[in-house]
Amino acid sequence: MKAQHERHENQILKAENQKLRAENNRYKEALGNATCPNCGGPAALGEMSFDEQHLRIENARLREEIDRISGIAAKYVGKPLSSFPHLTPRSLDLGFTNLGTQSGFVGEMYGGCDLIRSISGPSEADKPMIVELAVAAMEEFLRMAQAGDPLWTDQVLNEDEYLRTFPRGIGPLGLRSEASRESTVVIMNHVNLVEILMDNQWSSVFCGIVSRAMTIEVLSTGVAGNYNGALQVMTAEFQVPSPLVPTRENYFVRYCKQHSDGTWAVVDVSLDNLRPSPTSKCRRRPSGCLIQELPNGYSKVIWVEHVEVDDRSVHNIYKPLVNSGLAFGAKRWVATLDRQCERLASSMANNIPAGDLCVITSPEGRKSMLKLAERMVTSFCTGVGASTAHAWTTLSATGSDDVRVMTRKSMDDPGRPPGIVLSAATSFWIPVPPRRIFDFLRDENSRSEWDILSNGGLVQEMAHIANGRDPGNCVSLLRVNSANSSQSNMLVLQESCTDSTGSYVIYAPVDIVAMNMVLSGGDPDYVALLPSGFAILPDGPGLNGGGILEVGSGGSLLTVAFQILVDSVPTAKLSLGSVATVNSLIKCTVERIKAAVMTDNASCR
């Protein structure tokens, strides 16, 4: 046994010796080809430090790796899909079923299916196909992003021209096609933009659109220390902030590539053929973002959204918005990205005049307050849509068919108070422009007209942090002075944000002691929040005086959502009385808002 053990050790040592010898030869070869950094001529060994020698060898290895991967990609780019026998449209057939018209809220409709949680990683046999599909999708996406007329007319895709340009395309046709393109300049450099899209940050940045996302497997992390060549298999659920619009679940590959002209492209394409599901109702054709570096830390972004979807379950009041492409299209992605880049730039700013800090005692306190507001917004967005991912259950005995009431038990979550949390949400149409509703709801002077919990008390703004070009984009700390001397005053954290595709006013009562800690620069993660608020969307594209389509020139689609702690004991049973109370609260708030904004709208006319 001892002899066998020694022989085994000898074999290991021999293998290690051969590895070191090969590495030594590689170093010698690299040193023999070394050049002087000043004149470019051959360099003697003594002219370079060991660290510099090591870096040059590493650079040479990375260049070889880049050339190898580029060579693999070049084999496929430019070839028709007939070159890939397993990428025929028939093989990518999703097997969509004919779904009859279904009533009720979509949270109930999709309660039995959770595509995102049920998907596992791709098999080894699938991975070559995924790579080829990603490369082909990148080629189609680049042509879609850069083409002009006749493929795109006023950023609307010409379907006939698309079929001529991409005769076989990638995947089947047959569902309703939804395609859009939008471009803008954002205040963020290209490196950070790529990092956001390829990291888990993207679901936080786009929390109003992405209700949840998961990276199933990373097939490639990229080369040269960045995301060039990165390939990820992912799932995501896209939403509109309303319980009346079904979420869109996708299983896709995301591919990032830096091109020879310095631009970066991040493209998604569905992999539904690998995991066919009879309940799948949406697939992503090549969609994504083209990023061009601009001076002074800015970037130009071109966004393309191209999907095929069965959206027959969308509620009638939301159909004009969804059919126009404004609900899930490129314009909404770009507007959200632009606003979030402004918000991030504001949170990183240090040159804030001391007089603008109000009750905030330091720049650290300002950052902590912005971080707390960001968590509040994310929490609100996850509970206002139709997603079934967040452990919410729909109660049947609500006594109403237009208010969705859901409950969850909050335990061991430092960001939420422990106990039973009740959420209620409803959406409705109102014939008032979105901007007017947004300005009314965010104004502390009109808060007493709709906020039942303020009890008619005077509302005073204690702190104000602007985080965008629009004056409506801001975070505020409000103090509600109770009209009843026997009741204590209340602090409310509020964030209002708006862009060309929609607006939010989100708020949450906060503990005075905890808020003082945050204002002093303390950690905001342990401040318990139960956010409530409003999501305001246009009811569809309107026409301005010149006959040009614009967003928000007509009526509004308003979603009202509350979260209330109804019992501090997580194991307690929820009573119907609590449900009736929150149902009554949300209905009373809706009636107050309708009465106030309709009166204001009539006086403006």
Image: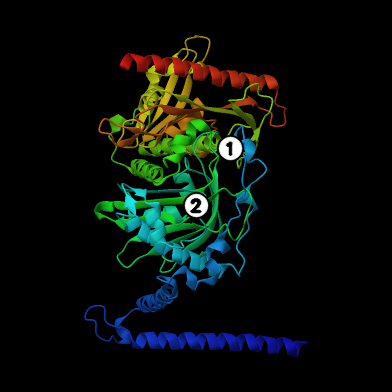
**Which sits earlier in the primary sequence, circle 1 or circle 2?**
2
Is residue 445 among the parts visible in the rendering? yes
Q: Which residue is drawn at 34% across and 78% down?
A: 49
Which image quadrant is residue 418 in?
top right
Q: Circles 1 and 2: CB distance less than 8 Å? A: no
Quadrant containing the N terminus in the rendered view = bottom right
Query: What residue does disc 1 label?
Result: 414
Quadrant containing the C terminus in the rendered view = top left
User: What is the total number of numbered labels drawn onto the structure image?
Assistant: 2
Say the numbered circle drawn on residue 583: none
Q: Nearer the viewer, mark 1 or mark 2?
A: 2
Query: What residue does disc 2 label?
Result: 200
Image height of 137 relative to 372, above or below: below
Is residue 422 among the parts visible in the rendering? no
Query: Residue 497, percent across and down?
Result: 39, 34
Query: Residue 464, percent across and down?
Result: 36, 29
Image height of 465 relative to 160, above or below: above
**Viewed as shown, does residue 447 lie left or right of 184?**
right
Identify the secondary structure beneath mark 1: loop
Residue flagged by tag 1: what amino acid is it?
A: Pro
Query: Residue 165, percent across and down?
Result: 38, 61
Q: Residue furthest right?
A: 1
**Viewed as shown, does residue 348 lie left or right of 313?**
left
Residues packed near mark 2 inside 10 Å, few (<14), some (14 to 19) or many (20 plus):
few
Image height of 109 relative to 164, above or below: above
- Give the camera-side residue of 43 and 372: 372
Query: Residue 274, percent across and down?
Result: 60, 61
Residue flagged by tag 2: what amino acid is it?
A: Asn
Image height of 273 relative to 331, above or below: below
Q: Which residue is drawn at 55% across and 69% down?
A: 86
Identify the secondary structure beneath mark 2: loop
